[in-house]
Amino acid sequence: MALYYDLPVYRDTYKLILKIFECTKDFSKEYKYTLGQDMKRDALQLVRSIYRANKNVRLLSNMLNGKR
């Protein structure tokens, strides 16, 4: 099983996060702390979800193979 940071979906999501941070720094004050923060939070949640899903797949694989 691939490590989460080797997965294409993780790499693409990481690039998206970098792009979001780059774009939101130029938002006006009105949107930077509302829409900008929401976009950053949701993008970071994607990375967490990818990590957790990959971790659970690895755990399940190990359980089925009799490993701990």
Image (cartoon, rainbow, N blue to C red):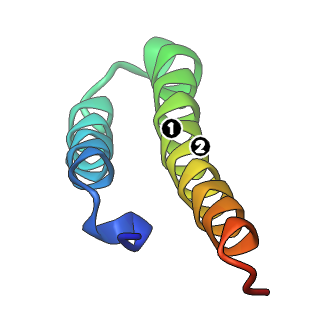
Q: Residue furthest bottom?
A: 68
**In the rendered view of the protein, which quadrant contains the C terminus?**
bottom right
Give SS at disc 1.
helix
x and y percentages locating residue 54 in the rendered image: 53, 57
Categorize mark 1 by other alpha carbons within 10 Å: few (<14), some (14-19), many (20+). Answer: some
The amino acid beneath tag 1 is: Leu
Asked whether disc 1 touches disc 2, contact meaning CB atoms under 8 Å apart, the reply is yes
Residue 11 on image: x %, y %: 23, 55
In screen coordinates, is 64 left or right of 54?
A: right
Task: Decide which of 68, 10 is in the foreground and name it.
Answer: 68
**Real-space Cα distance between discs 1 and 2?**
5 Å
Q: Is residue 3 left or right of residue 25?
A: right
Position of 5 with respect to 44 (left or right) is left
Find residue 62 and report its horizontal and vertical position in percent.
Answer: 66, 74
Tag of residue 12: none
Q: Could you tell me the amino acid type at mark 2?
A: Ser
5 shown above or below 10: below
Between 8 and 32, the one lying in front of the other is 8
Query: What residue is shown with label 2?
Result: 49
Furthest toward the front, the residue is 65
Question: For the N terminus, which image quadrant?
Answer: bottom left
At horizontal 59% and vertical 39% (from top left) the residue drawn is 45
Q: Quadrant of residue 17?
A: top left
Residue of label 1:
46
What secondary structure is marked by label 2? helix
Residue 62 against residue 54 in the figure, above or below: below
